[in-house]
Image (cartoon, rainbow, N blue to C red):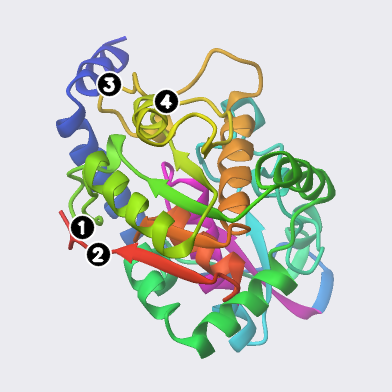
Amino acid sequence: MLKKFLKRILKENGSIYRMLRQIHEELHRKYKKERLKNHGRLHPDKPFFVIRAESETGGLMSYYNSNIGWIAYALRRGWIPVIDMQNFKNPYLSEQMLHRQNAWEYYFRQPFDYALEEVYQSRHVILSSGKPNQTASPRLQGKRLKNPQYLKKTSNIIRKYMRLNDDMKKCAEENAQKLLGGGIGIGVVSRGTDLLGYPGHSRQPETSELIHLTRDRMKKWKADFIFLATEEEKVIRQFEEEFGKGVIRYNKAEKFDDYNSRILAEVSFDREHDEFLKGWEYLITVLLLARCHYLIGTYVGASVAAVAINGGKYRDTCLIDLGIY
């Protein structure tokens, strides 16, 4: 009872709560070591590398960008990567489904189509460490993606090993036809809420500044519409007031205007399968960003993942760098 009371009080003071969560996660990573395990007799000739969720509160694109790095790490060593978002807490897996379902497979296929249950009955299983790999940082990853060779290498990993499952692929196609048809589109990423002021993360422009930049690029790029990716309803309204409702398109996902300074990963909506749906909506938005003709954003997970998924097909991009908090 006391534990629940203290947790509630801390959540009401968002800045202190986020600081304590960050300390908790850093300690969690520090003591989670890479290690070899013998889980059974299957596949004695195959070394599996189990990619464990580094954070309990990461966004889906944080896991996505991080997994790109871990897959490359495994392939360099001749290991078979397998992604485990089943046995480690993450925002896309309900407490009831912990140890029962793999949240990664809600959206993607496994890199080599080996089932997690099969891997955990195998002889040579290497568990990933809790140390974030270099791809986990959106700023570092975004800057490295400016290198055409690195972008090509990353795009190849995505194409071969981070494939959407059939349901996700079908939904992405349907939404692309509905939201991106008819003209030249600019994908615009507006990131706010819990990221603002978070130490080490990219500084975000004011909405008014982003609107001014978008208007300038619309003229320069001769664009017809804006696909807006934001977690805030108020940002959508501001863009619609400036450009008109007919110009602004967006994925009708749940918004986080009443998150009360908490970590977004811990915000829930009153609906069935909420954890799964938050990831589904987020991923659809990023996949649509990757299909736009142009992109405006900052060095955050959604923008960087969109650049990687797009694979160099954008006609032009504008990634704003205002430093870090």
- The residue identified by callout 2 is 321
Question: Of tags 1 and 2, which is closer to the observer?
Answer: 2
User: The residue tagged with tag 4: helix, strand or loop?
Assistant: loop
Q: Is residue 284 left or right of residue 149?
A: right
Against 283, residue 36 (above or below) is below
Q: Position of residue 229 (x, y in %)?
A: 47, 42
User: Where, by quadrant of the figure, is residue 71 drawn?
Assistant: bottom right
User: The residue tagged with tag 1: helix, strand or loop?
Assistant: loop
Assess whether residue 85 is covered by the magenta stretch.
no
User: What are the residue bounds of the magenta stretch?
Assistant: 45-71
- Alpha carbon of mark 1 to alpha carbon of mark 3: how far? 21 Å
- The residue identified by callout 3 is 260
Marks 3 & 2, CB-CB < 8 Å contact:
no
Q: Position of residue 43 (x, y in %)?
A: 83, 73
Q: Is residue 241 visible?
A: yes
Q: Which one is earlier in the sequence, the residue at label 4 or at label 2?
A: 4
Q: Where is residue 76 in the image (x, y as percent from the top left)?
A: 59, 88
Q: Which of 203 and 182 is in front in this view?
A: 182
